[in-house]
Image (cartoon, helix red, strand yellow):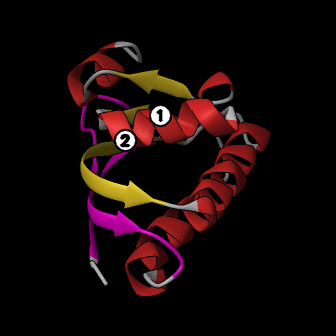
Amino acid sequence: MQTLEITIEPIAELQNTYIAHFQGAFDGGVKEPLEAVEKLVMGSTEKTTMIFDFKSLDYLNSYAIGQLVAWHNHLIKNGGQLIIASPSKNVEDIFNIVGISTVLKIFLDAESATASLK
């Protein structure tokens, strides 16, 4: 089983905006690395934006899709948003198949995702 590593950093020039870099496989077996994301998203109170950089994400499954939708819904409810950046072809295909690409904003890279917020 592959592991998942996530690093989260604030985007200095944008208030309440964070970028989380995902590396590895995002599935139900990786709950511990998700704790920091869960705490940040679910603890957000107002207009928090999360950019998930999937440049180094190799795989995700239905568990991951469920988490993304739950986080998206929570952020939207509080005036924020969840943005996906740099999905691989495999991840992008999964998003298209399950229809999540019509729900989330998806950008080719983290730079264009960040620029869209300025």
* Quadrant showing the C terminus: top left
Residue 64 drawn above or below residue 117: below
For residue 15, which quarter of the picture? top left
At a point 66% along the width and 45% down the height, the residue shown is 72
Residue nearer the viewer, 62 or 13: 62
Q: Amino acid at mark 1?
A: Asp
Judge whether residue 6 is colored magenta.
yes
Q: Whole-percent x and y of residue 74?
A: 73, 51
Left or right of 23, for residue 103: right
Q: Which residue is mark 1?
A: 93
Q: Are marks 1 and 2 in contact (CB under 8 Å)?
A: yes
Dot 2, crowdedness within 10 Å: few (<14), some or many (≥20)?
Answer: few
Which residue is disc 2 drawn over? 90
Q: Which mark is residue 10?
A: none
Q: Is residue 87 visible?
A: no
Q: Which residues are magenta?
A: 4-28
- Magenta stretch: dominant SS? strand
Query: Mark 1: which secondary structure?
Result: helix
